[in-house]
Each structure stands twice: as structure tokens, then as C-alpha cells.
Amino acid sequence: MNKLELQKAAVEVRKGIVSSVHSAKAGHPGGSLSAADIFTYLYFEEMNIDPKDPKKADRDRFVLSKGHTAPGLYSALANRGYFPVEDLLTLRHTGSYLQGHPDMKHIPGVDMSSGSLGQGVSTAVGMALAAKLDGDDYRVYTLCGDGEIQEGQIWEAAMFAGHRKLDNLVVIVDNNNLQIDGAIDEVCSPYPIDKKFEAFNFHVINIDGNDMDQIAAAFAEAKATKGMPTAIIAKTVKGKGVSFMENNAGWHGKAPNDEEYGIAMEDLKKAGEALCQ
């Protein structure tokens, strides 16, 4: 897809996030919206995947380490054709396969159940190591929250990945600078994030994670990097695309009411229309 098509797809992914969380009357819109451009690029452009064959052996793998942003992952999967977009409205409903956190046993396209913060990188490292041991060439991607990387297990996994030179692994940090209790540098600062990953023998790329050109360039650079894993530190805006949610920690984990939902969808409708000019 070209840049414009990806940007349009990202708007649709954001609409799915807002609609599903509104329908559920619960969920995590802020961090789903900040990562929507990354979800879109991964599933529509970067990864070797096939919605018609979600379990194909040579597919690239994705682990959503910050599993509470499942609305973003689900919207990307639905818009990519893994399951009907209308099913997004069943998010968190009793009997729905779209639970509050990703479930690999029931959701097509989900490679790992996740949500216990700090554990996703370890899982991705295991997948990347398995590919190396088996002589397979699939790649493994994992997305972390910047608040999540306050967890020690993240750095244990990073140490191992760097030591084993897992150049088929890409760790993406959604650096929107906000976690549930406020700004990450005030709660428990992980800065400088890039220097920390470099210390664990990662190739590090800093980007604007809401800019498709920079996202594309970063993943191309990661793919060209040999002998070490890559960390992409993606500076993003929490709640990106919805005026009243942007840079507001209060929208980490709550659903919009009907009036707020209307405003949010109008914001996204205008964003989509602007791309069609």
C-alpha cells in the first residue's frame, strides 16, 4: 500500500477502536489510538501474513505486550480481513470471542495471549529464538507501552535477545509519555529509553510513531540490520486522532459516552475526508 492508503486505513482502525470501546462501555482507547499507525503499518504492509491462513507456518509473528490495547489490535485484524469488522462491537460482551485482552485460542490472527504487563518481550524473544534454532526466516514483532517498560522482565528479555543476536526481533515502544497514573517521567522514569536498549546490544531507531514515512523507514532499517535485535522507540500522542483524548491520561482506560462518541467519530470522519482531498 502507498502512504495515503495506509493513512486512510489507520483512520478506519481508529474508528474501530472508538466504536468498540464505546460499545463495550469499557476498555483502553488512549494507548490503542497512539499505536494505531503502527498497528496499521504492521498488518497492512510490513508483516508476511495471510488472513485466510492465520496459522501459516512461515508467517511473521506479533505479540501485543501491552495487551490492554487490544482494541487497536482487534481493529487492525478486522480491517485486514481476519474477522468481520462488525464483530468489533461485541468487544468485552459476554459470549464474545473479543475479550478485553488478546486470546490466541479464540481470535484469528492473535499469535500470543497477553496482558500481564512486562511479559510480551520474553514471549517474542522465545519465538525469535525458535526461528533461529529451526532455520526459519520469519520475523517477530512486539509492541510495549512506555509505562510497561518499567517492568524488570522487559530488561531481562532484552539482555537475552541482545546476547543471542536475535536480528529477527523488533521491539517497538509506544512512547506516548503517559501511563494510567500520569506522565511516565513523573511516575517512574524509564528515560533515556534508547540508551537503555543500546546498552543491551540493540540497534535503536527513534521515530515519530504517528508518521507513516518514519514508520516505514524504521521497519526497513530494522530488516536491514544484521547481528543484533532492533528497538524502535516511537514517540506518539496518546489518544491520537480524537481531539479531547489527545495527551490526556484520563483516557488511558475509560469509554466515551454517547456524546463523546459522536465527537470522536466526527473528528475521525473529518480526518478521513481530509485524506481524500
Image (cartoon, helix red, strand yellow):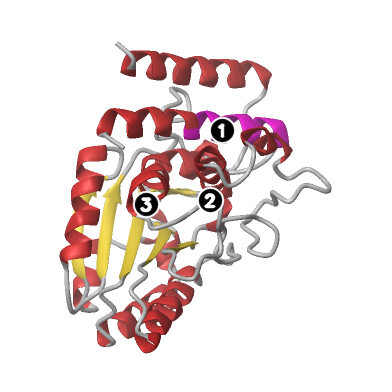
- Image location (x, y in percent) of residue 93: 78, 43
| x 39%, y 61%: residue | 188
| x 48%, y 54%: residue | 50
| 17 within the magenta span | yes
Residue under numbered circle 2: 51
Left or right of residue 19: residue 269? left
In which quadrant is the N terminus drawn? top left
Left or right of residue 17: residue 40? left
Q: Quadrant of residue 262?
A: top right
Q: Main secondary structure of the magenta part?
A: helix
The amino acid at mark 1 is Gly
Q: CA distance from mark 2 to mark 1?
A: 18 Å
* Crowd class of label 1 (few under 14; some 14 to 19; many from 20; radius 10 Å): many
Q: Earlier in the sequence, mark 3 or mark 1?
A: 1
Residue under numbered circle 3: 174
- Image location (x, y in percent) of residue 12: 48, 29
Q: In this rendering, is residue 177 above or below 48?
A: above
- Image location (x, y in percent) of residue 98: 69, 49
Of residue 178 and residue 170, the one placed in the foreground of this image is 170
Q: Earlier in the sequence, mark 3 or mark 2?
A: 2
Q: Nearer the viewer, mark 3 or mark 2?
A: 2
Q: CA distance from mark 3 to mark 1?
A: 19 Å
The amino acid at mark 2 is Pro
Determine whether the residue tagged by mark 2 lies in a helix, strand or loop: loop
The amino acid at mark 3 is Asp
Q: What's the magenta region?
A: 13-25
The circle on residue 16 is: 1
Q: Quadrant of residue 156?
A: bottom left
Q: CA distance from mark 3 to mark 2?
A: 25 Å
Determine whether the residue tagged by mark 1 lies in a helix, strand or loop: helix
* Crowd class of label 2 (few under 14; some 14 to 19; many from 20; radius 10 Å): some
